[in-house]
Amino acid sequence: MILYKHFDTNEKGHLTVGGLDTVELAQEYGTPAYILDENVIRENCRVYKQAAIDAFGADALPLYASKALCFTGVYRIAAEEGLGIDCVSGGELYTAKRAGFPAERIYFHGNNKTDRDIADAMDMGVGTFVVDNEDELAAVSAEAVRRGITQRILLRITPGIDPHTHRAIMTGNVDSKFGSAIVTGQAMRIVKKAIAADGVKLAGLHCHIGSQIFDVEPFAEAADIMIRFIAEIKKECAYEIRELNLGGGLGVRYTEYDREIDYADAIHKIAAVVTGFCRDNGIAMPRVILEPGRSLVAAAGVTLYTVGSVKEITGFKNYISVDGGMPDNPRYALYQSQYTALIANRAAAPRDYRATLAGRCCESGDLLGEDMEIQKAKRGDILAVLVTGAYNYSMASNYNRLPRPPVILVKDGKARVAVRRETYEDLVALDQF
Ligand SMILES: *Cc1c(COP(=O)(O)O)cnc(C)c1O
């Protein structure tokens, strides 16, 4: 086992994922390639769904925050596992529609929905809009009135948790492009407008405090603030908020230096404090929605590359270059995300070498990690970066005109192509002259 039980080595010393030999997968599908263990995604969905129902009651619903990994197959999996989804763009909505995802279980997010997004989402019958701000409320209300419908909405609220108290938190602070803040009075103002607005039904509130959070405490703090706000709305507006979406953000173990996290346990702990806060504030327990992204899909993934040049710069770093890089995984370039890497064809050997993993783009910042523990590598080796299921394929680009890798789903000893590799033909398909 390497980090997770679905990553292991076989008798050849090769890395396996879901029991399949990654060196053989690389031979069959080429590199770079994203490999995903479908059973891991399904198992994570079940853990969240069961824990949410046990802890919050039968109407609790986890939504898969699909920006983490988006293609039709992943929406089919989420639908089969009984989850809702969170979409943030017309493109994600369209993909969900093509996958046949039930529209009533879609929550439409985003801090700047265009008029076209709003119209497309209403055409699809999207169940719930998560309205970010007053301009958007007016636009959603106007379009719903024009169509003669009542659109169910939540309002995105910024609970105003001081980001300095919790380093991981980046989106729940007052100075944010997301949502309306409670402390500035903007939150109460948009609530009153939403209650009065035509064409919309205010069903609840949403908050999302950030990502890669390992402690329950920031969620408890956010829930406390949100529930007190719900009590204030009840008092000031005589209006009952019946749904509370607590967002996503539970952390993922990317390296052996990260803590392990028991998602069911975290959900039960959050539920205990939410129940207490509701009682203390004299409000009925709302329907609780959770919005995990990375914690459903990250661990399922591994990216396979072929090693090209290996450079040892005397007195400086060692570089291992691979046939991918920031176009398939921009996360190190964006925010120095840490990963576990190994040589898949010598995975059982100790990782007793240190190297910087370089991509193939014309950017010095095109790195997958620096000073990483790995086996010594040579040209032609297969290099695996683990835990790449989230925010890799969904963030991929064609920089340097590199075709995007395929997504291969592994399940019960079999592999299938979920997204085929882009071709050079695909790259020029949109060019008009
Ligand atoms: C990104 C995001 C999520 C998911 O965050 P993870 O860290 O991937 O769990 C959930 N809700 C909203 C609104 C988000 O922006």
Image (cartoon, helix red, strand yellow):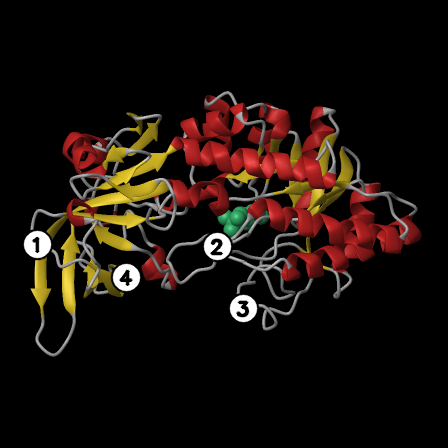
Residue 251 percent across, percent down from the top left: 50, 54
Residue 241 percent across, percent down from the top left: 81, 43
Q: CA distance from mark 1 to mark 2?
A: 32 Å
Q: CA distance from mark 2 to mark 3?
A: 18 Å
| Front position among marks 2 and 4 | 2
Give the labeled residue for mark 4.
Answer: 369
Identified at 66% across, 34% down, the residue is 128
Instruction: Name the amino acid, label 3.
Output: Arg
Residue 402 percent across, percent down from the top left: 20, 44
| Front position among marks 4 and 1 | 1
Identified at 42% across, 27% down, the residue is 72
Secondary structure of the residue carrying tag 2 is loop
Which circle's residue, 4 or 3, is located before the other in the chain? Answer: 3
With respect to residue 223, does 382 lie above or below? Answer: above
Q: Quadrant of the C terminus?
A: top left
Q: CA distance from mark 4 to mark 1?
A: 18 Å
Give the labeled residue for mark 2.
Answer: 260
Instruction: Name the amino acid, label 1.
Output: Lys
Pointer 2 with pointer 3, Cβ within 8 A: no
Instruction: Name the amino acid, label 2.
Output: Glu
- In the rendered image, the residue lying farthest to the top is 100
With 429 as the anchor, is 226 left or right in this view? right
Give the crowd class for mark 4: few <14, some 14-19, many >=20 residues within 10 Å.
Answer: many
Give the labeled residue for mark 1.
Answer: 378
